[in-house]
Amino acid sequence: MDNTRVFQIPFAKVYPMYVQKAERKGRTQAEVDAVIHWLTGYDEVTLKQQIDKRSDLQTFFAQAPRINPNVSMITGVICGYRVEEIEDELMQKIRYMDKLVDELAKGKAMDKILRK
């Protein structure tokens, strides 16, 4: 499958959708940010810079300070695919982020989302 188009989507376009999804379910932007910080190692300043630069998803993950070493603990189905079985590394990272935001929107406790 050719994922090139997905990789070129600006993170700044995806981020507000994550926040809206979480807020519709009674969660906050700060919680969405915490999930993204945990996954990517970005802090408030560097995350805002990525949004302001309109980095695409490929660049967003390529420039991530560090992908959390516990990402392998993220399992389950998102968009019809088991995240732990996705072979393309970048697509897997994108789906990890989708899965974490989905868990947040479903009301899961932050400690469980952040695999503590």
Image (cartoon, helix red, strand yellow):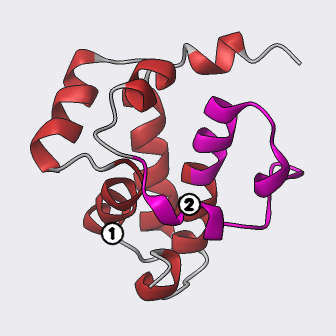
Give the crowd class for mark 1: few <14, some 14-19, many >=20 residues within 10 Å.
Answer: some
Q: Position of residue 57 (x, y in %)?
A: 49, 25
Residue at 39 percent across and 63 percent down: it is 35
Looking at the rendered image, the quarter that the C terminus falls into is bottom left
Looking at the rendered image, the quarter that the N terminus falls into is top right
Q: Which residues are magenta?
A: 67-96
Residue 69, relative to residue 43: is it above or below? below
- Residue 73 is covered by the magenta coloring: yes
Amino acid tagged 1: Glu
Which residue position is annotated with label 1?
31
Q: In the displayed structure, does residue 48 sit left or right of residue 116? A: left
Q: Position of residue 98 (x, y in %)?
A: 60, 51
Callout 1: helix, strand or loop? helix
Residue at 10 percent across and 41 percent down: it is 45
Examine the image and state in which quarter residue 3 appears. Answer: top right
Q: Which mark is residue 71?
A: 2
Residue 109, relative to residue 96: is it above or below? below
How far apart in space, not on screen, are marks 1 and 2 (Cα)? Answer: 18 Å
- In the picture as drawn, the residue positioned furthest to the front comes out as 69
